[in-house]
Amino acid sequence: MKAMTDTPRQNCKFFLLRYVPDAVKNEFVNIGLVLLPPQAPPELRFARNWSRVQALDPQADTELLDAFRDELSRESDKEMLLGKMEDSFSNALQTSEYKACLTAAPAQEADELARIYLDAPRGRRAREASARQAIFQRMRREFDQTGVWKAMWKEIPVARYSRPGDPLEIDCGYKSDSTIKMFQAVSLRTDLAAAKVLAFSYSELAAGILRIERSQARLTAIIEDGLEKAENDQIEFAMETLERHAIQVATVSDLPDLAIVAAREMGVLP
């Protein structure tokens, strides 16, 4: 029989605050949690530090995240809190769907949920971003060593050439005669969906470059070394999808040669 002194449990709901630097790839890190008891102030919890954010996005503005956390943490009124969140959120900050929980101690429940969602080891999405970043950093280093990185276009917005709102950006590129050559780091070992995203966007990107720049487009996806089409069906599908959409595929080992070609075409090397 339930004791008369038991604290009644409350029907609470909670949602997660997510940092989403790239909406197309849908990579995100949980940075906070808001638990809403029915008759008490909201319980807010944030990640202890931004290390997981920086692993996903090395360029993340952590000072802005600090300010966002501090502002929300000072608010105890539920409606005011939700209003501030709605006003403050940018495309890089999103909320999850609401989830229900039944608890007699909302503060303790928020602590436990924070441990599960905020302090857990980095999951798959962070590994995906880390693998792509490793390829990108190698690409940057090779182009930098031949002296062309500073002069290359960076973070080329696909929306400029396709349609407004397309958030995809191409890592880097340069113009050689009547061709714009672009390069994108893609980890097929951890993020096969990135190949489909790139293939989906490329036809409009190429058409827009031809229309606006009066140039042909050539896009090369830089992938990991050691991947073979026969490694598994999904990798084979991803590589064939890229090739079928006229996207060239090169590996990290090909980067030194690609960097030398770029340096010659850009007039840095004879």
Image (cartoon, rainbow, N blue to C red):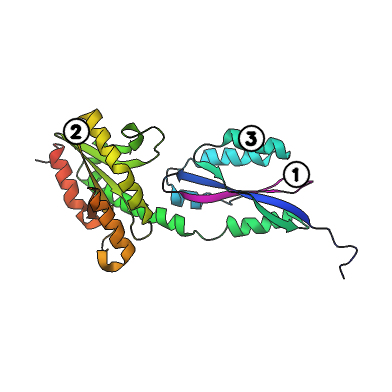
Task: Residue 114: give x, y in percent of width and height.
Answer: 63, 55
Tag 3: Cα neighbours inside 10 Å, few (<14), some, or many (≥20)?
some
**Residue that mark 3 sits on:** 84
Q: Which residues are magenta?
A: 25-44
Q: Amino acid at mark 1?
A: Pro
Q: Name the residue nearer the viewer: 102 or 118.
A: 102
Using the image, determine if residue 76 lies above or below residue 109. above
Q: Secondary structure at mark 2?
A: loop
| Residue 33 included in the magenta stretch of the image | yes
**Residue that mark 1 sits on:** 41
Which residue is located at x 31 percent, y 65 percent?
Answer: 233
Q: Secondary structure at mark 1?
A: loop
Q: Dividing the picture into quarters, in which one does residue 148 lie?
A: top left
Which residue is located at x 38 percent, y 56 percent?
Answer: 191
Residue 223, visible in the rendered structure: no
Q: Amino acid at mark 3?
A: Lys
**Residue that mark 2 sits on:** 215
Tag 2: Cα neighbours inside 10 Å, few (<14), some, or many (≥20)?
some
Task: Residue 11: give x, y in percent of width and height.
Answer: 75, 53
| Residue 213 included in the magenta stretch of the image | no
Q: Are marks 2 and 1 in contact (CB under 8 Å)?
A: no
Tag 1: Cα neighbours inside 10 Å, few (<14), some, or many (≥20)?
some
Residue furthest toward the right? Answer: 4
Q: Dividing the picture into quarters, in which one does residue 101 lie?
A: bottom right
Task: Residue 50: give x, y in percent of width and height.
Answer: 52, 49
